Amino acid sequence: MYRVLILTNTLKTGGAEKQSIYLFNTLKEKFNTKVIVYYGNQVDQRMLDLLPDNSDKRIVFLRGSHFRKLIQIFKLFRQSDDTVCISYLATTNTINAIIGKITGVKIRIGGIRNSRFNWLKIIIQRHLHNYWLTCSIFNNHYGYEELISQGFKKEKGLVVFNCIDVPKKIKKEQNLNQINLLTVGRFVEQKDYITSLQSILELIKNGIDIKYTIVGQGHLEADLKEYVVKYDLVKHVEFIINPPNVNDYYKQADIYLSTSLFEGLSNSIMEAMSFGLPVVATDVGDNKYLIIDSESGFLVPLKDVERISSKLKILIANSYLRKEMGEKGYNHIKENFSEKKFANEYINLIEKLSNGK
């Protein structure tokens, strides 16, 4: 029986961390599986809540200096010949690749989770992928194709979409008065919140009464709040900073908005669709694999405020369309991004690699 070690930077709220937990939950019955948290003091309770009961002994929280942590990892890696190590981000990919190879970890699976990297990360990740890791899993086709064109060995790459724990379908009460728009994401340049806010401003100029909630955290928080004040949007825009339960905001929303400049596979869009929300999103990354244009939402060009606001108007004006698109999106996510499908992809890969294929 293989021993599977899932190496993650933290258990703070984030896409890679959440996928690490989903992976642990789906593999623990099939393999002897542990999660190793490199920064063991960086943990959010809502991430721990995703773990099943009695899993404490299978979660290793590393503490102390980097040297001490690396020694602990070295010892963990050497405990069995039949070991698989899985990582998702640059730091843990490096540890997985180098210490894993030195200690004889048989299968070292790295992860690529975005579609763009700076030049230094590309060089490092490419070297790890080509020479040190057994293979790398990309969570999106766009990033896979981009990086293959930049020298990543194609035969060592595989696309496995993120999964999501799809909740039971909830009956959404359609708001007849003020419509609630929602975006969940870090306050960073990639998310292009200025385009979102300009689109909201355009709707308000046309006499449409809406509430726009932005849930997240990040270094642009002050700049975005300043923009909201400058353009007199305070009555319509609310910032929620790292709340304990993001799902409450998905449940209260009517429409999900994403104006990202680039994405891999968007966890927040997946989550929104799992709560039956129609989505207006920029046509970037693998959004086209999530959103069926004009069926479960609308895909729009980058920074196109006029197009974004016009698609929002269509949804705001038609409660039946919101419900219909939301249901189609929910069914699409449930059928194509389930934990079961996610687990089977990893199990098949591990079995294939263990047989030397």
Image (spheres, helix red, strand yellow):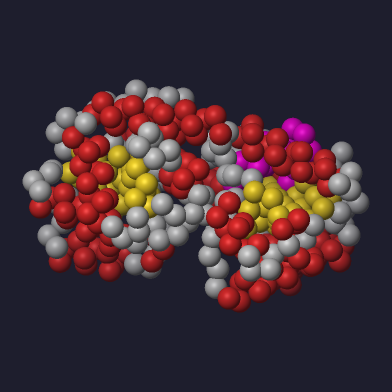
Q: Residue at x 50, y 43 (%)?
A: 289
From the top left corner, tell me how far across and down residue 188 is, in percent. 39, 64
Position of residue 346 measured from the top left corner of the image (x, y, whole percent): 72, 42
Q: Residue at x 52, y 54 (%)?
A: 264
Please state the extent of the stretch shown in magenta in the rendering.
19-34
* Above or below: residue 89 compared with residue 183: below
Identify the residue shown where x is 10% and y is 48%.
206
- For this rendering, which residue is in front, 90 or 57? 90
Does residue 118 show up? yes
In the image shown, does 31 or 10 lie closer to the viewer?
31
- On-image quarter of the N terminus: top right
Q: Is residue 13 visible?
A: no
Q: Nearer the viewer, residue 64 or 222?
A: 222
Residue lying farthest to the bottom in this orientation: 120
Horizontal side of 299 relative to 142 (left or right) equals left
**Quick check: 38 left or right of 277?**
right
Q: Considering only vertical position in the picture, is 59 above or below 326? A: below
State yes or no: residue 30 in magenta: yes
Residue 285 lies in magenta, yes or no?
no
